[in-house]
Image (spheres, rainbow, N blue to C red):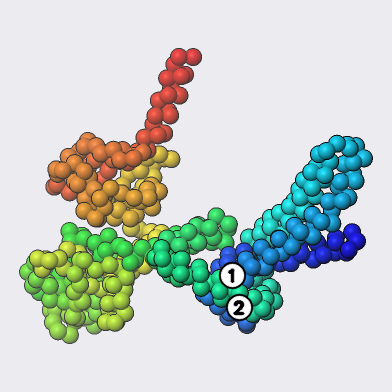
Amino acid sequence: MDIFQSILILLFLVSSSFFLSLSEIAIAGSRKVKLKLLAEQGDDRANKVIQLQENSAYFFAATQIGVNAVAILGGIVGESSLRPYFYEAVDYFYQGPWADSIGFGLSFLCVTTLFILFADLMPKRLAMIMPEKLAIAVVNPILVFIRVCKPLAWIINLIANAIFRLFKVDTRRDESLTFDDISAIMNDGAQSGVLQKQEHHFIENVFELEERNVPSSMTTRENVVYFTLNESEESIRQKLAEFPFSKFLVCNEQIDQVIGYVDAKDILVRILNNQKINQLNESTIRNVLTIPDTLTLSEVLDRFRTTKEKFAVVINEYALVVGVITLSDIMITVMGDWVTPIEEEQQIIQRDANSWLIEGSTPIEDLQHALEIDEMPDDENYETLAGFMMYKLRKIPRPADIVIFGDYKFEVVDVDHYRIDQLLVTRLIKQADEEIEQQQEKES
């Protein structure tokens, strides 16, 4: 066999190994979500790739048989065909006893470099760049190759499965998608510019509905505006003018004796018809949906959907009213400032790049978003910033009380009848940097 034939055989072996290495990485690295999208667009090859991923034992066995067999043949052919030429080249400069060994070493190095570069490194890098596109391109020929190698692959898999069972290794591929996986995909999309910052924020908030409880978004008990059965007409008119709500609770004498609710539209209709509005009865009072304060926002959405209601009273374990929640409250949690009324006071006001004025009733989740805090300590013990301060201080906070957590200092600014009204939150890192700069200026 002359050098020309040897080179042709060597090139064929390198090309075969290139194809097998590329196929292995492309099919293994293809993302199932993208493959399903391609399948929905009518490309049947994408379904074949998914099936290969789900039943990958024969695929990996066949590709490894091919890759290793080609590598061994390449070494035999390359060494036997190239060694004489390298020996002659070495003999031209050196005629010592090591000439044959040097020629063998050079031929081995040449063949090894050829396989590493063109049969291993380059195909794998290409497959990592565009796995789905290459996977559907090679899946049909690779299925033919698997059928050819199936008898030997069956024996190899039998031995491999026995070893896995011996060491109790589960070989099933976990295809479940967790919230962390989806969050990572969203972060990648935001960084690459596919998702805008606001869109990324919306999607994160939607997933948080499953984790956030009702108290994080409800109107708290002290802020609930309600009518009593004996409410005067003047008082009702004043509340309608002062509070632009669409629904008002109706209670017997106090807030914990809930009877139902009235829609502001019904009262306005009575006003337009010159009817008395202080005679609240069955025609105007509607049944109100009551929910426990332990529900998640996702569960509340489901209750609203099944009952066709958009307003609910939140009850605690002692059957006391702790607040009310509407469909609009949940939408504000998801959409943020996009649906928040302009006249509504903001709970978080950023004073400058490193300080914030924050209301004590601010939900912990909103605080984490605003300050970019990944995790709060023991957050199962409280739901608001005020609860966080009480938990850390182990007492009823007073003005000027301070809690330091991470890079932030939380200072109580205003307390109203034991209720923490407002706090000043400051980033400590910036303060330290400014103090150092001021000290350096004084020294200079």
Q: Is residue 132 visible?
A: no
Residue 1 rendering spot, x and y as whole percentages: 88, 63
Q: Earlier in the sequence, mark 1 or mark 2?
A: 1
Between 243 and 13, the one lying in front of the other is: 13
At 34% across and 50% down in the image, what residue appears? 375
Residue wearing tag 2? 151
- Amino acid residing under circle 1: Ala
Give the residue at the far top of this rendering.
443
Neighbor class of circle 1 (other Cα within 10 Å; few <14, some 14-19, many 20+) is: many
**Residue at the right extreme?**
92
Residue that badge 1 annotates:
61
Choose top left, top right, bottom left or bottom right for residue 51: bottom right
Residue at 42% x, 60% y is 180
Q: Position of residue 63 (x, y in %)?
A: 63, 68
Decide: few, some or many residues near mark 2? Use Cα within 10 Å; few <14, some 14-19, many ≥20. Answer: few
Going by the numbered disc 2, the residue's amino acid type is Pro
Depicted 263 relative to depicted 71: above or below: below
Front residue of 256/285: it is: 256
Q: Which mark is residue 319?
A: none
Q: What residue do we see at 85% from left, 36% from top?
A: 96
Please say whether residue 88 is visible from this viewpoint: yes
Mark 2: secondary structure: helix
Q: Secondary structure at mark 1?
A: helix
Q: Nearer the viewer, residue 357 or 77?
A: 77
Q: Residue at x 30, y 40 (%)?
A: 405
